[in-house]
Amino acid sequence: MPDIDQPIVYTPAIKKRILDFLSRSDLKSSDWSIDDIKDIRKFIRDYYRNITRKCFYCRKDISLRSVDNCHVEHIIPKSVQIQFMFEPKNLCIVCSDCNIIKSKKEVSGQIETVTKNGKLYTMYPRSSNAFIVVHPHFDNYDDHIHHSGDIYISKSKKGSYTIHICELNRKVHQYGIDSNPLTQSELFDIFHNIMNSNDIVQQSKYMNKLREHFIKAG
């Protein structure tokens, strides 16, 4: 199941305001910050904050009231595809660092276009396969990234790319590893559990613990 399985649903009144807003002839991606839609931004922020309760990319805490460390993230950047500015499945909540670092980096491999009544329309991707980044509405984070504290380990190509574009191991790179490797007894228990478990999921968790140990131990 994806991290977000129920995207936001706009009220008819908000939906009309969004359509009017997007129809502006001089619309710019920076208009997202204007006061005219401050209440809509809050509506979106509060909805996704109550669902995820943490930054989607780094899994760290976000602010509960302030907007300073609880940003509405446009997964496909609004500067790249402005028409997706309010697309429910293009939105989630992230912390300030991830918001700044990810910025306008490429996340999608496929953007569909359709022709209707002689006009060309760009469609929002409808599946996980259309993205090269871990997507909160299509992917389960834990299927792609394992993290413990400030250490992030990829479990897939998507996980690796997400770690890269968000610089998720930034604290380790900046300050080094807070070394606290496992004791000999703990290592013995993990090896024993791996050898005696027939559960692939559990084996994977034990293997991740070993990876963390060897990273910390240097």
Image: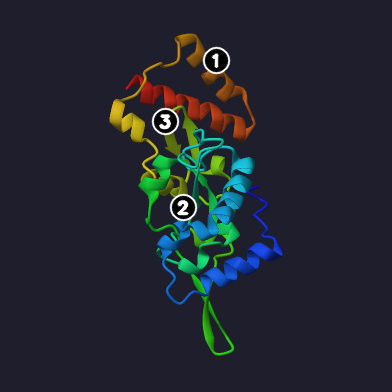
Please tell me which residue is depicted at 51% across the width and 38% down the height of the picture. 66
Q: Position of residue 178 (x, y in %)?
A: 37, 20
Q: What colour scheme does the image use?
A: rainbow
- Amino acid type assigned to the residue bearing label 3 in the image: Ile
Whole-angstrom CA distance, mark 1 to mark 3, is 22 Å
Q: Is residue 125 above or below residue 73?
A: below
The answer to which of 200 and 80 lies nearer the viewer is 80
Q: Nearer the viewer, mark 2 or mark 1?
A: 2
- At label 2, the amino acid type is Val
Judging from the image, what secondary structure is the residue with disc 2 in? Answer: loop
Vertical comparison of 150 with 88: above or below: above
Q: Which of the numbered marks, if any, corresponds to residue 133?
A: 2
**Neighbourhood count class around disc 3 (C-alpha, 10 Å): few under 14, some 14–19, many 20 upward:** some
Cα gap from disc 2 to disc 3, whole angstroms: 18 Å
Per the rendering, the mark at residue 189 is 1
Disc with the residue nearer the chain's start (2 vs 1) = 2
Crowd rating for badge 1 (residues with CA inside 10 Å; few <14, some 14–19, many 20+): few
Kindly indicate whether the residue at mark 3 contacts the one at mark 2 (C-beta within 8 angstroms). Answer: no
Label at residue 151: 3
Mark 1: which amino acid?
Answer: Asp
Placement of the C terminus among the 4 image quadrants:
top left
